[in-house]
Image (cartoon, helix red, strand yellow):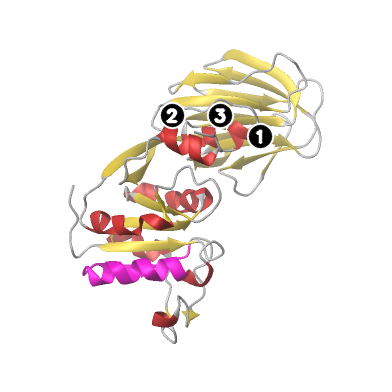
């Protein structure tokens, strides 16, 4: 696929991961030498400008940042600098515009990021449009209260329901058929992309990220038989909280703000019509990434 030379490449750093915007400014320099227009839009804070960052070549040069919402209509690609959380935040902004995302891993595990900082030479291929696009499934989450929708959101990684420092009772259904019931700290409803995140840490399976499934993983269930379930993607998963105790609970989508759940609330999670588009440039397979990130000795 090709890119219009006049299109804009939006650089989305996490200013904590890319201290001083050093990597962001290096990438900007490369892209501008290739004749590409760029904009810098920090994903967590777009309210500041920077001066004299990025090393000696950038010393004294003001680095003006803009809001990602203002740049999206003219953007052809987003490049993120951070960990998977940075990609999650950028994906929320980009998804309705269909803009693909290329990630530089400057965080921890970085399963979603395509490039490490040593892969900067691949920017030439990215700028020339020599890449593949991988579609990633997303989830829609909805909370019903008294028959009315009181909360809606969408997730690339997961929807998490947890007790507020107390054990909660959960019953999970797939298309109205009971899947499992248990008491515990909560449950994770994840996409394949999110299977290597919180779901894996809670004992869930690793699923190829390009697959189309819904993964249910209990969190610290108080029952020996509690297991993860991998469902086909067209299941409508519903969750009821409390059949004995009615302890406080909340829902979090992609690690975002907590939404407090009340007695009688019903949570529905289903496959979204939205997709995140990730850019692929390297030949590294998902299995190689898993071995590398999880420390397998080869």
Q: Which of pointers 1 and 2 lies earlier in the amino acid sequence?
A: 1
Residue farthest bottom in this picture: 60
Q: Nearer the viewer, residue 238 or 184?
A: 184
- How far apart, in angstroms, are the residues tagged by discs 1 and 2? 23 Å
Q: Residue furthest front?
A: 298
* Pointer 3 residue: 268
Foreground pick, 115 / 38: 115
Mark 3, secondary structure of its residue: strand
Tell me residue 260's x, y (percent): 69, 42
Report the magenta residues as a range. 22-42
Q: Secondary structure at mark 2?
A: loop
Which comes sooner in the sequence, label 3 or label 1? 1
Q: Which residue is mark 1?
A: 161
Residue lying at 21% horizontally and 52% vertically, measured from the top left: 129
In the rendered image, residue 29 lying in the magenta stretch gets the answer yes
- Residue 22: x and y, percent? 46, 70
């Amino acid at each position: 696929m090709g890119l219009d030379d006049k299109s804009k490449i939006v650089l989305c750093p996490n200013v904590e991961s890319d201290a001083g915007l050093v990597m962001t400014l290096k990438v900007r320099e490369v892209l501008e030498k290739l004749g590409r227009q760029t904009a810098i839009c920090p994903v967590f804070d777009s309210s500041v400008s920077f001066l004299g960052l990025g090393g000696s070549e950038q010393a004294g040069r003001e680095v003006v940042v803009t809001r990602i919402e203002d740049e999206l209509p003219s953007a052809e690609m987003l490049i993120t600098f951070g960990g998977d959380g940075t990609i999650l935040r950028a994906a929320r902004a980009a998804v309705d515009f269909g803009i693909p995302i290329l990630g530089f891993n400057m965080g921890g595990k970085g399963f979603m990021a395509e490039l490490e900082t040593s892969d900067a030479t691949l920017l030439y291929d990215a700028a020339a449009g020599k890449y593949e696009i991988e579609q990633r499934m997303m989830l829609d989450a909805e909370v019903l209260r008294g028959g009315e929708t009181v909360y809606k959101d969408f997730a690339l990684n997961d929807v998490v329901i947890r007790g507020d420092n107390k054990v909660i009772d959960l019953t999970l259904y797939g298309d109205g058929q009971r899947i499992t019931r248990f008491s515990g700290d909560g449950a994770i409803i994840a996409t394949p992309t999110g299977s290597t995140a919180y779901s894996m840490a809670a004992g869930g399976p690793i699923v190829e990220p390009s697959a189309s499934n819904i993964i249910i993983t209990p969190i610290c269930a108080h029952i020996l038989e509690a297991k993860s379930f991998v469902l086909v993607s067209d299941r409508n998963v519903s969750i009821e909280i409390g059949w004995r105790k009615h302890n406080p609970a909340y829902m979090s989508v992609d690690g975002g703000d907590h939404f407090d759940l009340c007695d009688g609330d019903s949570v529905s999670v289903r496959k979204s019509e939205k997709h995140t588009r990730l850019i692929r440039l390297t030949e590294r397979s998902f299995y190689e990434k898993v071995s590398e990130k999880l420390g397998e000795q080869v």
